[in-house]
Image (tube, helix red, strand yellow):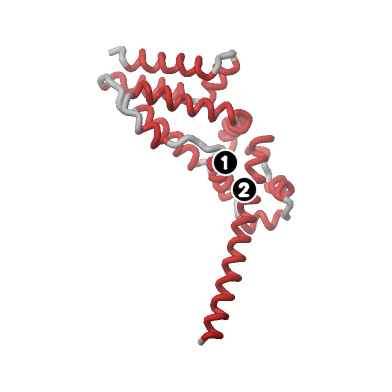
Amino acid sequence: MAEQTKRTGQRTYRMTRRRDGLDAMSRRIAEAAFELHGTVGPAQTSISAVAERAGVQRHTVYRHFPDMTSLMRACTAHGMQVTRTPEPAPWRAIADPTLRLRHGLGELYAYYRSNARLLGNIVRDLPLMSDVGGAEAFEERMGELFGALAEGWPGEAPTQRLRMVTIGHAMAFETWRSLADKGLADDEAIDLMARLVTEVVTAD
């Protein structure tokens, strides 16, 4: 019995080590894809380029990620973790919608500034990658952030569409980039967008 238990333990240990090795290789490949997204963009990130960056063969990439969609999905998850994509729960804890908006835009614009090249590449390339997908987790997170900022504003039904449009516009990476390119600091951009949203949603 003791010998059987020993063999079982050794088998479990080997399986755990193998699984850990596979997980480490998957992370290595996802990291390589993420780095390429930040330099050349998703549309130019081929399996061959990922394999070269990760220091493995193409068949190794395919063994861990059988198609580009699964690789994109892993890359998105890795990217959201390392870039610390904002989360909606702390925003929702702020009851006042104006203060919540300013706080949320502050986090979002700081996130955009820290990851401007990466996000610029992604925004540029995603329309070219619609048949691939894999960025659903990021898109879902942005939808959750929008929902957090859209809650609790005063006004009747006719303001609902304008509210969504103005908050969505204020949140867009392209909006931040346009304002930043024109020389606005993030706090100035936040003031401008918060004033726009506030004026629209109270103009009944």
Q: Return the mark for residue 82.
A: 1
What percent of the width, then of the height, locates residue 106?
48, 24
Looking at the rendering, which quadrant does residue 90 occupy?
top left
CA–CA distance between discs 2 and 1?
12 Å
Q: Earlier in the sequence, mark 2 or mark 1?
A: 2
Where residue 167 sits: x, y (%)?
Answer: 41, 23
- Badge 1 marks a residue whose secondary structure is helix
| Quadrant in which residue 95 is drawn | top left
Amino acid at dot 2: Ala
The residue at 49%/28% (across/down) is: 108
Q: Write the residue at 64% across / 59% down.
A: 63
Q: Residues within 10 Å of mark 2 (few under 14, many from 20)?
A: many
Q: Is the Cβ of the residue at disc 2 closer than 8 Å to that at disc 1? A: no
Quadrant of residue 36 within the rendered picture: top right
Q: Give the labeled residue for mark 2.
A: 30
- Left or right, residue 189 beside residue 164: right
Picture mark count: 2
| Disc marking residue 37 | none
